Amino acid sequence: MNRIYYILSALILLLMTSCQERHPAPFQDITGVYFNNTSGSMTVTDSLDVTFVYEASDEVEVPVRVQLLGRASDEARPIGMTVTSDNAEEGVDYVLPENAVLPAGASSTDYVVTLKRTEALKSEKKMILLQIHANEHFDLPVDHIVQVADTVSTLEYRIYFSDMFTKAPAAWDENLVGELTQQKFELVCKVLGIDPGDFNDSGVITLAKLLYISAEMTAYVEGEVEKKNAGEAYDEDAFDPQTGEPLTFR
């Protein structure tokens, strides 16, 4: 019995040694980087659409994931990165990190782009393009990924941003608070102190809350109409800039 055991053990050891010799460690000869950003469905994407409509802050940080393909290093390594745009200006519309670097020991890093809210974003969508380039530290072994017949770039990433609606907020009910316009939406948030992001949560903006908004905003606009008619200072945002008519919330 012992003889059979030793023979089997020797065979297993031989097979393990043989496998190790035929299959070298993965990535031992690869040192590369690529963009690896996913959507809510965990599919890789090469673009992102950001709107300030639901943001209380005038700045939004967008982390862009850069992934290592290969072994981590004991030293920080610069990443070849350029950021360009045809209609956005660095320092005015967006702010970039000082350097693009993969930290020591890391297998990925987030290159954080800070977007800035400007008045121009209410009528124009802007775009910045991030591109990864090869350098003395990293190659580009992966340039795209194919997903369900869709080819996604892993060397370019686009960020679109505006201060306009990309879609109506989930909790806005036109039967209760009237037709949605950005001016009305922003006036509600300003006057009632509601976080813009709350309008995408029907658990926060409930039916009762919408009825409250309708009543409060109707009273507010009526008060501004009285001020205007009396020649007093009034809130111009309570009136349609094209027609001069007061906004309605019913």
Image (cartoon, rainbow, N blue to C red):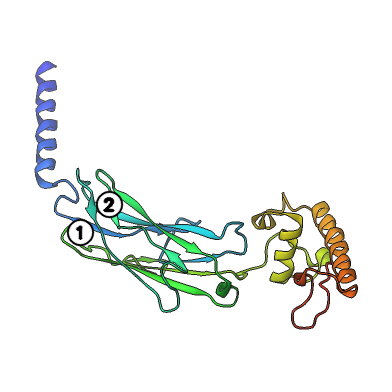
Q: Secondary structure at mark 1?
A: loop
Q: Nearer the viewer, residue 39 or 102?
A: 102
Q: Position of residue 221 (x, y in %)?
A: 84, 67
Label placed on residue 138: 1
Marked residue nearer the N-terminal end (2 or 1): 2
Q: Left or right: 250 with respect to 103?
A: right
Image coordinates of residue 31 in percent, x first then y, are 19, 55
Checking the image for residue 102, the label placed there is 2
Q: Which amino acid type corresponds to the residue marked 2 in the rendered image? A: Leu
Q: Amino acid at mark 1?
A: Phe
Are discs 2 and 1 less than 8 Å apart at CB?
A: yes
User: Is the residue 225 above or below the residue 193 in the image?
Assistant: below
Decide if residue 18 is on the left or right side of residue 217: left
Dividing the picture into quarters, in which one does residue 190 lie? bottom right
| Crowding at mark 2 (Cα within 10 Å: few <14, some 14-19, many 20+) | many
Observer able to see residue 250: no
Residue at (19% x, 49% y) in the render:
26
Q: Quadrant of the N terminus?
A: top left
